[in-house]
Image (spheres, grey):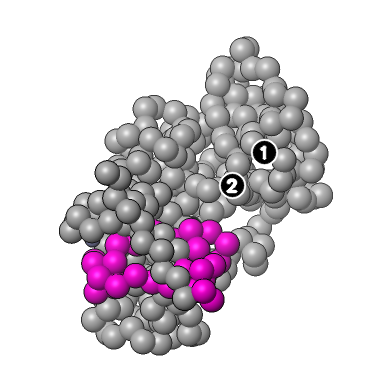
Amino acid sequence: MPELPELEVTRERLAQALTGLRIKTATLHHAFVLRSVDPPFDSLVGNAFRAFDRRGKHLLFRTDPDTVMAVHLMLGGRLRLRPAEKFKPHRKRTLLSLAFEDGSLLEMTEAGTQRRASVLLFRGALPEHIDRGCEPLDDDFTEARFAELLARGNHQIKTALRDPSLLSGIGNAYSDEILHAARLSPVKLTSRLTDEEIARLYHALRDSLLDWIERIRQACPPGLPASQDLWRRDMAVHGRPGQPCPACGDTIQRISFSGSETHYCPTCQNEGRLLADRRMSRFGIRRRERAPE
Ligand SMILES: [Zn+2]
């Protein structure tokens, strides 16, 4: 799933390509993608997007005067820019398309059959479910604010970082990277964090996100970021079980965690000890990934 860094670069590229262009046609290829009734989707025609914002994992396309199209790509959704004259919608994957006065076209697709990507059209203030967590890169997101958020509950840090009611835009991949940069165990409880560890986590969070935004800008050719594989291959621990940690050389491990896999370095993040894998721990098993021979 695209997370804050990918979405931030997507937002920038959309703004560069589409700001101020009049929308010629607005087509819903699969009506279920639109999760709102008023204003109607075809009211976009004749308008132009004046600004492109992001809240968490929602991209916000703003028209005059105050209509907003909020796009959530979920797991399989993608946005693509292409020439309108060559556009052929895919019977299953193409969800909507917008054609612009300069001959360009924005296509939203979704791979798979789950149908979870969504579009919401509304006027005025953001609906509550979009505007829940703190934006970790906003100026008012201070270390004190972060400490206050963590103190609201007592969760494993990995869970807290991914909780959209606390923090916006962070998912499984970047939480692994942030925790590795902060040298903290994903399962440590937030109530057990010292002030020094909270400070370390705060700076790792902001520095990692800013660093990845810049890396994605560099890695992606002009246009919208398409494949996450391109830059996620350069991650330190996420998606690299069995490979050496770039910081210490220890073998990166994985555990199952809330329905997904968490990757970590035992030496950098847990004093060299393996974490119990909940799938296995009732048998008292701690699997160790082996480095390839
Ligand atoms: Zn390490």
> Could you tell me if the residues under marks 2 and 1 are in contact, i.e. CB atoms within 8 Å?
yes
Q: Amino acid at mark 2?
A: Leu
Which quadrant of the view contains residue 262? bottom left
Does the image show residue 273? yes
| Cβ at disc 1 under 8 Å from ligand 1 | no
Residue position for label 1: 112
The correct choice, above or below, for 249 with respect to 83 in the image is below
Of callouts 2 and 1, the N-terminal one: 2
* Element assignment for label 1: loop
**Of 276 and 210, the residue lying toward us:** 276
Where residue 238 sits: x, y (%)?
Answer: 38, 53
- Boundaries of the magenta span: 256-283
| Residue drawn at 47 percent across, 42 percent down | 11
* Element assignment for label 2: loop
Q: CA distance from mark 2 to mark 1?
A: 9 Å
Does the image show residue 209? no
Q: Residue lying furthest left in this view?
A: 248
Where residue 151 sits: x, y (%)?
Answer: 43, 85
The circle on residue 75 is 2
How many C-alpha atoms fall within 10 Å of the one at disc 1: few (<14), some, or many (≥20)?
Answer: few
**Of 100 and 144, the residue lying toward us:** 144
How many C-alpha atoms fall within 10 Å of the one at disc 2: few (<14), some, or many (≥20)?
Answer: some
